[in-house]
Image: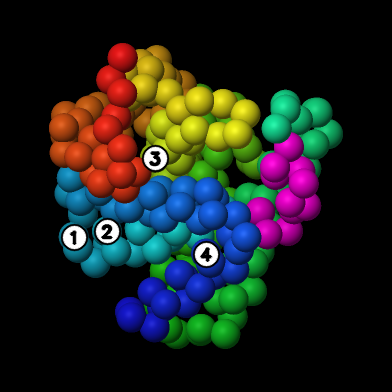
C-alpha cells in the first residue's frame, strides 16, 4: 500500500504542478473524503485510506486542459465549459492507462479512482456530467468526493471571489440535499459538524467565519 500511496501522491503532484492553490485543494479534498468515510459512513480504516487516495487524484484530468482556461477569472463560455467538463473523461483515461502497469497490484484501488475521476461532477438529480447519472447510479465514492469538493471550493478564496462562511456553505448543502448532493451524506456530515470544522481549520490554518 505504501508504494501505491507514493504513486498516487506523485500523480497528484504532476497534475497540479505549478498550481499551489490546486495542489492544496486536492489534498484537502482527499483529507475531507477520508473524514466522511470514517465518521459518516463508518468504513473500515483500509477503505478510508483507499477513498482518500482516490480523492487525491479526482482532478488529474485537468492536466490535459490549457492552464489559461483553468485560470480564467471570469465565467466560461458554453463551449469552454463543455471543454473543461471533459477533464472527467481525461482523468478516467489517464488512470486507466497507469493501471495497466499495475495489473494484479490492487486493481480495485485504480477502479475506484477511475470512478471518482469520471463521476465526481454527477449530481443526485441527474443534472451533472459527464453521463447525467442520478441517485445511487453514482458510485458512493464519487458522491463523497463531489460533496467535499464543493465544500472546499466554496470555503476557499480565489483571485476572482472571496471564500464563503461556513454558515453560507452549510445553507447551500442543506438546499442541495437530494438535488446536488446525496442527502444521507449531508445529514451525516452535519451530525459531526464540530469535528469536521476542526479538521477544516487545521487544514486551512485560519479561523472559519460562521456568519
Is residue 143 in view?
A: no
**In the image, which residues are magenta?**
61-72
Mark 1 or 3: the one toward you: 3
Q: What is the crowding at mark 4: few (fewer than 14 residues within 10 Å), some, or many (at least 20)?
A: many
Residue at left 20%, top 40%? 198
List the residue tagged with mark 2.
48
Distance Cα–Cα, label 2 vs label 1: 6 Å
List the residue tagged with mark 4.
12
- Residue 44's disc number: 1
Q: Are marks 4 and 2 in contact (CB under 8 Å)?
A: no
Q: Earlier in the sequence, mark 3 or mark 2?
A: 2
Tag 3's secondary structure?
helix
Q: Earlier in the sequence, mark 4 or mark 3?
A: 4
Q: Earlier in the sequence, mark 1 or mark 4?
A: 4
List the residue tagged with mark 3.
148
Question: Considering depth in this image, is 6 or 211 the residue closer to the camera?
Answer: 211
Mark 3 or 2: the one toward you: 3
Distance Cα–Cα, label 1 vs label 4: 24 Å
Q: Earlier in the sequence, mark 1 or mark 3?
A: 1
Distance Cα–Cα, label 4 vs label 3: 17 Å
Tag 2's secondary structure?
helix
Answer whether residue 69 is magenta in the image. yes
Amino acid at each position: 500500500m505504501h508504494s501505491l500511496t507514493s504513486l498516487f501522491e506523485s500523480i497528484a503532484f504532476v497534475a497540479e504542478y505549478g498550481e499551489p492553490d490546486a495542489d492544496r485543494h486536492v489534498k484537502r479534498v482527499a483529507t475531507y473524503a477520508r473524514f466522511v468515510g470514517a465518521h459518516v459512513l463508518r468504513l473500515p480504516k483500509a477503505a478510508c485510506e483507499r477513498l482518500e487516495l482516490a480523492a487525491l487524484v479526482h482532478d488529474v484530468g485537468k492536466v490535459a486542459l490549457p492552464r489559461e482556461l483553468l485560470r480564467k477569472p471570469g465565467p466560461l463560455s458554453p463551449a469552454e465549459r463543455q471543454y473543461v467538463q471533459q477533464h472527467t473523461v481525461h482523468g478516467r483515461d489517464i488512470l486507466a492507462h497507469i493501471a495497466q502497469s499495475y495489473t494484479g497490484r490492487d486493481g480495485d484501488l485504480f477502479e475506484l479512482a477511475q470512478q471518482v475521476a469520471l463521476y465526481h461532477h454527477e449530481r443526485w438529480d441527474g443534472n451533472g456530467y459527464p453521463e447525467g447519472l442520478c441517485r445511487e447510479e453514482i458510485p458512493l465514492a464519487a458522491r463523497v468526493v463531489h460533496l467535499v469538493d464543493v465544500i472546499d471550493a466554496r470555503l476557499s478564496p480565489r483571485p476572482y471571489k472571496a471564500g464563503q462562511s461556513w454558515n453560507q456553505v452549510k445553507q447551500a448543502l442543506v438546499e442541495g440535499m437530494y438535488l446536488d448532493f446525496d442527502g444521507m451524506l449531508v445529514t451525516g456530515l452535519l451530525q459531526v459538524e464540530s469535528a469536521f470544522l476542526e479538521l477544516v481549520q487545521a487544514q486551512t490554518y485560519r479561523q472559519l467565519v460562521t456568519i
